[in-house]
Image (cartoon, grey):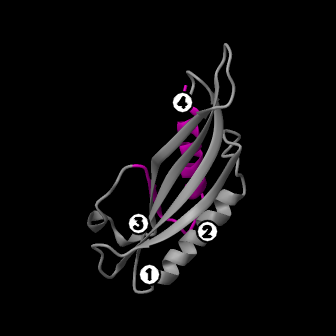
Amino acid sequence: MASKRELIVQNIVTQIQSISSIKMVTREPKDILELSVASFPHVLVETANETRDNSSFGTEVRKESELEILLNIVVHGNNRDQQRNNAIEAIEQKLDIDVTRGGHAFDSMLTEVTIRELNEAAPYGQAVMLLTIKYFYTKGTP
């Protein structure tokens, strides 16, 4: 059985894959120079930092977790800024429909958007969306 953490990430991937304007969603990094133009906008979903805290004690320890998910967006074309903005808006709108991530979290939200211009040249543009997911789990079943 998958952990709640994994179920949350799977939910995010599934939701982003259902956005018609997003052409490719992966969980493993790809060399953008090897992708076809039809693969953009491309979104790489990565699990990032997590903080955990005990929320109850006794025979069954319940923990509260705050998980960060990075959505690395790469666009291709002459209108990079517009494409980034459109992808960010489409993803945020889709993920806001169910902030419980399929019932596995009690809250999730977009907390930061960063535009990346490092080591990048036209026609590529990048942005990173930081999602913060709050969920509970019982110790031994993260």
Question: Mark 4 or 3 closer to N-term?
Answer: 4
State left or right for residue 75 relative to residue 62. Answer: left
Q: Distance between the residues labelled 3 and 1?
A: 15 Å
**What residue appears at the point 65 percent right and 52 percent down from the top-left corner?**
108
**What residue appears at the point 34 percent right and 81 percent down from the top-left corner?**
123
* Vertical order, 112 against 119 (above or below): above
Instruction: Name the residue tied to disc 3.
Output: 39
Question: Mark 3 or 1 closer to N-term?
Answer: 3
Please state which amino acid type lies under the numbered disc 3.
Answer: Ser
Q: How far apart are marks 4 and 3 (CA)?
A: 29 Å
Please state which amino acid type lies under the numbered disc 2.
Answer: Ala
Instruction: Name the residue tied to disc 2.
Output: 90
Image quadrant in which the N terminus is located:
top right
Q: Position of residue 32 (x, y in %)?
A: 31, 65
Q: How far apart are marks 1 and 4 (CA)?
A: 37 Å
Question: Mark 3 or 2 closer to N-term?
Answer: 3
Question: Mark 1 or 2 closer to N-term?
Answer: 1
Q: How many numbered badges does the structure rendering display?
A: 4
Q: Is mark 3 on a helix, strand or loop?
A: helix
Circles 3 and 1: CB distance less than 8 Å?
A: no
Please state which amino acid type lies under the numbered disc 4.
Answer: Ala
Q: Determine if the magenta segment contains residue 11.
A: yes
Instruction: Name the residue tied to disc 4.
Output: 2
Instruction: Name the residue tied to disc 1.
Output: 80
**What residue appears at the point 64 percent right and 21 percent down from the top-left corner?**
61
Q: Position of residue 26 (x, y in %)?
A: 43, 53
Circles 1 and 4: CB distance less than 8 Å?
A: no
* Vertical order, 66 against 15 (above or below): above
